[in-house]
Image: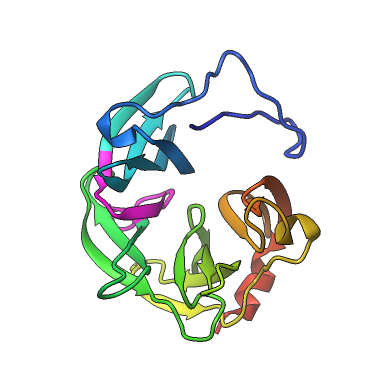
Amino acid sequence: HLRILFSSDGVNFKESDEFPPLFGQGTYESYGIEDCRVSQIQDTYYLTYTMVSPKGVGVGLKTTTNWKDFTSHGMIFSPHNKDCALFEEKVNGRYYAFHRPSSPELGGNYMWIAESPDGIHWGNHKCIARTRANAFDSARLGAGAAPIKTEKGWLAIYHGADHKHRYCLGALLLDLNDPSKVISRSQTPIMEPEEIYEKEGFFGEVIFTNGHVVDGDEIHMYYGASDEYMALATLSITQILNTLS
């Protein structure tokens, strides 16, 4: 299930009884909901999350304007799919979103992009990033939070894992007018498990981000560590862009 937390400083968080948890509902969420990304488009928050059931793993969508009343839009990407993050503004009048279909027999766990006229019905799917042999993202990769608009393009932080299930973070730079065009990509991780709480835990050697807050050149990035802890890191947009090739 999903829980809503509040903070006045971005570091110390608490819950409120006025905002109850969100639990899975119906056939396609019978095993629960997880891995939520939140994108704000004007006054509406779009929650894309993983729906899990015996029928498979897909992407669900909920919207809200007040975090108390939610509209459920059902499954927007059918199984097997996850790691969906919406762009926080339209591009040429269209909504854009990352997603990660899985096809282990033919293809792989790659990062895709799709577009939509309304944020609910998606098409024109394109694969924008594949796994790379002997790299930190050799086994699978998928989107983190909503991409960040910069003067040089859309900056997308993503997670990549190798065949030992070690998760690191990389970055993609996408064309501002056509986000399906990749300008550059990390050759080495922009962040990797180093601290003890990132290397040891329920599932060690894992860092995995779904959300961030951008303040000028700084990205305050919230991420899961070892599938057990929540952590905060501060990154520089300029420094990340300088590492891409």
Front in this rendered view, residue 226 or 112: 226
Drawn side of residue 103 relative to residue 203, left or right: left
- Specify start and end residues of the magenta stretch as a single range: 75-97
Drawn side of residue 77 relative to residue 244, left or right: left
Drawn side of residue 239 relative to residue 55, left or right: right
Q: Is residue 82 magenta?
A: yes
Coordinates of residue 153 in the picture (x, y in percent)? 48, 69
Snapshot quadrant of residue 17: top right
Can residue 126 be seen here? yes
Residue at figure coordinates x 33%, y 68% from the top left: 178
Drawn side of residue 156 relative to residue 226, left or right: left
Residue at figure coordinates x 64%, y 65% from the top left: 237
In the image, is residue 116 above or below residue 204? above
Farthest residue to the right: give it: 196
Snapshot quadrant of residue 167: bottom right
Can residue 152 be seen here? no
Q: Is residue 138 magenta?
A: no
Residue at figure coordinates x 51%, y 56% from the top left: 144
**The C terminus sits in image quarter:** bottom right
